[in-house]
Every structure is written in C-alpha cells, then in structure tokens.
Image (cartoon, grey):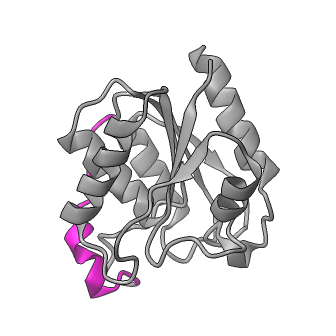
Amino acid sequence: MKIKILTLPGYLGSDVGHWQSIWEQQLENIERVEQDNWEFPQLTEWLVTLDTHIQKTDEPIVLVSHSLGCSLLNHWASTFQSKKVIGALLVAPADIESDRHTPDILRNFAPMPKQTLPFPSIVVSSDNDPYVSIQRAEYFAECWGSRFINCGSHGHLNAESDLGDWPFGQDLVKNLVKSLA
C-alpha cells in the first residue's frame, strides 16, 4: 500500500538536525505540514492548516508528530473526521498542561485531548524527556489507545538527542504501515 507520511513538528518547527527534517530529505512520499507561524502557535490556525493538508492528499495518510505536534494531532482527531488518516506515530508528546515547563504561548493547546484515537497509533517517549514524564507519556498513550514505547534516555527525541535519521522511528512507521495492509 502506498501511503503519504505527513510530519507534524512542534513548537518552533523541526530544525535541520531533527529526524523529521532528515526524513523529509531522505524518504519518498513524505511532506511536512508547514505552519505559518512556528514561534507563536495558535491551535485554531494549526488545525485548519493540518486539515487542509489532509483533505488535499489522495493517498492514505500516516501522521508523524513530535512534541506540540502530538497535541495538534489529538485536537485534530477530536475536531475533524477523515478516513484518510490510517495511523500515527506520536513522538515525545509535550505535556502542555504542566506548570513546570510549558511556556504561556502554548497554553492555547491545552487541555490535552484524552479521547481514543480512531486509528492505530504508537507513542514513543524517553525516560528523561524534560517536557513530559515517562508516566505522563504512558498515561497519554493509554488514553489515546496507543501502543507505548519507552525508548530509554534520549531527552526530547529532537535534534539535541543526536538521533540522526532515527532508524528505530523509521522501523516503527514501516511496521505500523505493514500492520495496516
């Protein structure tokens, strides 16, 4: 089955060394959902942009989100309906409800939706992510009906984590797609 991967970066986007950016350069049939404003994210605007990308895509879609992109994905799933989205990989979901580390600019993404996603999904988190505790990430996965993977101590699973093209993540997407065929 030929699928389209849409990447959903988080706050400030994914820079050059981020695995999402590397995947977008190396893999076929992958596209970033480019938001108009990465520095001052507005949930309503981001939702419209995501839904527009989904509606204009003809192939079945797997969403690959990172950090604030996980919140976006869940808000989209609770607001819009589309049979085009067949699966999702949610990486390092930022706990946007936390008073400890969430900037005020991101509060419009709270509360984190906690409904079961209408498609198969996997949540991957690190046990030393500064933006979500491993327990909270596991709780989100349980709420969303997602398979949960603790990938060890790799921080926020971003460019600073030095994951390169993150073969582990690519394998998760490949296996998710195989399970949907």
Q: Quadrant of the N terminus?
A: top right
- In the image, 8: left or right of 166? left
Q: Position of residue 149 (x, y in %)?
A: 63, 45
Choose top left, top right, bottom left or bottom right for residue 42.
Answer: bottom left
Q: Position of residue 75 (x, y in %)?
A: 26, 51
Choose top left, top right, bottom left or bottom right for residue 147.
Answer: top right
Q: Is the magenta stretch mostly helix, strand or loop?
A: loop
Residue at x 29%, y 45% (from the top left corner): 51
Q: Between residue 10 and residue 161, name the one nearer to us.
A: 10
Q: How many labels does the image show?
A: 0
Q: Position of residue 71 (x, y in %)?
A: 35, 57
- In the image, 181: left or right of 72? right
- In the image, 30: left or right of 36? right
Query: In the rendered image, is residue 11 in sight?
Result: yes
| First to last magenta residue range | 101-116
102 in magenta = yes
Q: In which quarter of the image is the C terminus?
A: top right
Residue at x 72%, y 68% (from the top left corner): 154
Relative to 17, say whether 137 is above or below: above
38 in magenta = no
Choose top left, top right, bottom left or bottom right for residue 69.
Answer: bottom left
Residue at x 64%, y 70% (from the top left corner): 158
Residue at x 35%, y 77% (from the top left corner): 37
- In the image, 125: left or right of 95? right
Q: Between residue 66 and residue 52, name the one nearer to us.
A: 52
Q: Between residue 159 and residue 93, name the one nearer to us.
A: 159
**Extreme residue in the top direction:** 181
Query: In the rendered image, is residue 110 in sight?
Result: no
